[in-house]
Image: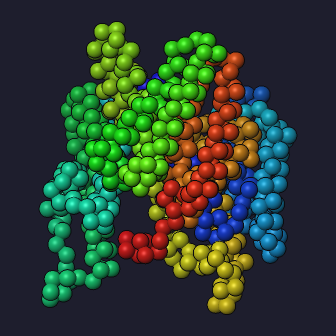
Amino acid sequence: MATADILVSLVVLAMFYSILALGMNIKYGHTGLLDFGHVGFYLIGAYTAALLVIPGDVGGPDTVYLFGLDLPWVVGVLAAMVVAGIVGAFVALPTLRLREDYLAITVLGIATIFQRIVQAETWLANGPDALRGITPPIIGRFPVDGQSIGGLVIIALICGTVWTLTTLGLGRIREILEAADRSVVGGGTDTLYAVGLLGTERLLGTERTGASPDGGVAESEAVGFEATTQFRMAALAGAIVAVATAVVVAINTRVGLLAVGTVVSVYTWLVLLAGINSYTNFDGIDYVATLALGTGFMLALAPMFYLDSVTVWVPLTLAAFAAVIGTTVYLRRNWSRFSARPFRYGLFTGVWFGIIWYYPIQVLTPLLNGNLMSAATTVFNNVVWILSFSGQTPRIGYSRFTLFLFGVILLASLYLMELVVESPFGRVLRAVRNDERVVNSLGKDPFLFKIQSMALGSALGGLAGALAAMYFQVLVFTMFAPRVTFIALLIMFLGGVGNNRAMIVGAFLFWAFQTATTQLAGFVATDLRTNFQAFRFVLMGVLFLLILYYRPQGLMGERSRTEVSDQ
């Protein structure tokens, strides 16, 4: 499997787990309701959507389920959210008038009951066997290569939307740099943003109206105008890219698709690099130091790759890791650059590790064999991630469409939840979390707000479950074990409790760790592979404890209300 395919799979998994963690964050991060049974609503959403969209005669006599209505996926996803939200509200009714710890225990028990019902009752969803026959939306149209009108429209829509969202992200990066008093005018980020807008700022104009006599404008008016203008410019740029894509691909399908895919993919990589640079605020010394540490951790794994004897490579690998970790701890304590930004150094060391793992190592083998063309092809296939090169011609496969679809749903969910938590309703939720007596003194009933928060968070869990059913196309009761709840909790604490955007960061870091350890397990002897994969859960628990001890607010922390109001 190409590296780009692995990364796409990682991102898709991180996306619907971000939504799952977002639901947990609404409950616990904003309202203070600890829910150990969040996986139960994930299960409800998955099976509700599956039973609504699956046809009535799939799988033959060996596949038994209550009903299959063959409805559109839009209906299935909305129904999954509604059912999960209603169940969440009813589960909370008898327990929230007592204490929050009763809620945690009750929901954990109910989630376990839901799982056992699915396992034991064969008539409901095929019992302990897998429920198969779940067909994702419009999968029959893929892969698309632009040779049909429908395929041309899909390609243009995907490329235009990716360009729009990427440009919006780049605009946000510029705002972060300006807020930190880091010059962007005339710099690389500013130039890239000008290229991404495709001249739309001239078509729409960026002059602000309503200025005061001294040339100023009200701050809130200026911020709102700028945000609206940025969205309009990015959307128009995306429309231009969509039209250009349709025209170029229609003229010459193969060359046009390669050209458009290359431009869009390279643009997204450049924006990603700009985003990383804006977060780290590194200079050349910092990048070299983190590259050296990342390379050191990679070299520590060399005995695992090249030695067959377990009794030899295990102690060598442990000794090499001890040396690299010792060096890292020494730098953390004695080097001011590292001690001032330890989490950013650690994060970027992991980024370098992943880059080395996925790119140079894959290219190294064909280079050593003298096959330069194979090495160049591998690099090109990984850079142009938006296209799939599994066939004779480049095309956009269904995995890329899934990435596009889940990305739009995640961003829409995040945007709506940001509106919710910054509304008066969201402020009451945080007041309930901090001190219920204050809420009571203002004449509001905390119980009602807790019920609404529980329903909203559970609905997001149902949405994540519906997306999981769409992605996996198969449902088994073991997918809904209690560990899923604790993964959502880990993602929430890793990113930052009470910070909706941090759920995306936490989910991506978690699945990056999962993917990396899964890849490493392939180099371990078969009889030790199960133990190796089980050991990563121990390591995950240790990392969780370290985060709670050293960084209880998470990597990003809760967003301050001042920061939100400024935006």
Q: Quadrant of residue 123?
A: top right
Outermost residue, right direction? 120
Residue 53 in sight: no
Classify 465 as above or below 375.
below
Residue 557 screen position, x and y as percent: 51, 62
The one of 57 and 451 positioned closer to us in this rendering: 451
Tell me how the rendering is colored: rainbow
Q: Residue at x 27, y 44 (%)?
A: 284
Residue 282 in view (yes/no): yes
Image quadrant containing the C terminus = bottom left
Q: Where's residue 497, x and y in %?
A: 58, 62
Q: Is residue 357 left or right of residue 492?
A: left
Which of the pair 567/540 is nearer the observer?
A: 540
Which residue ends up furthest to the front in the rendered image?
Answer: 334
Q: Is residue 275 left or right of residue 450?
A: left
* Image location (x, y in percent) of residue 473: 61, 36
- The foreground one among 517 and 164 is 517
Look at 21% across and 61% down and name the residue there. 183
**Residue occupying image coordinates x 34% and y 11%:** 368
- The location of residue 554, given as percent across then percent down, is 55, 57
Question: How many callouts does the rendering have?
Answer: 0
Q: Residue at x 51, y 56 (%)?
A: 555
Q: Is residue 352 above or below residue 466?
A: above
For residue 435, side relative to residue 504 (left or right): right
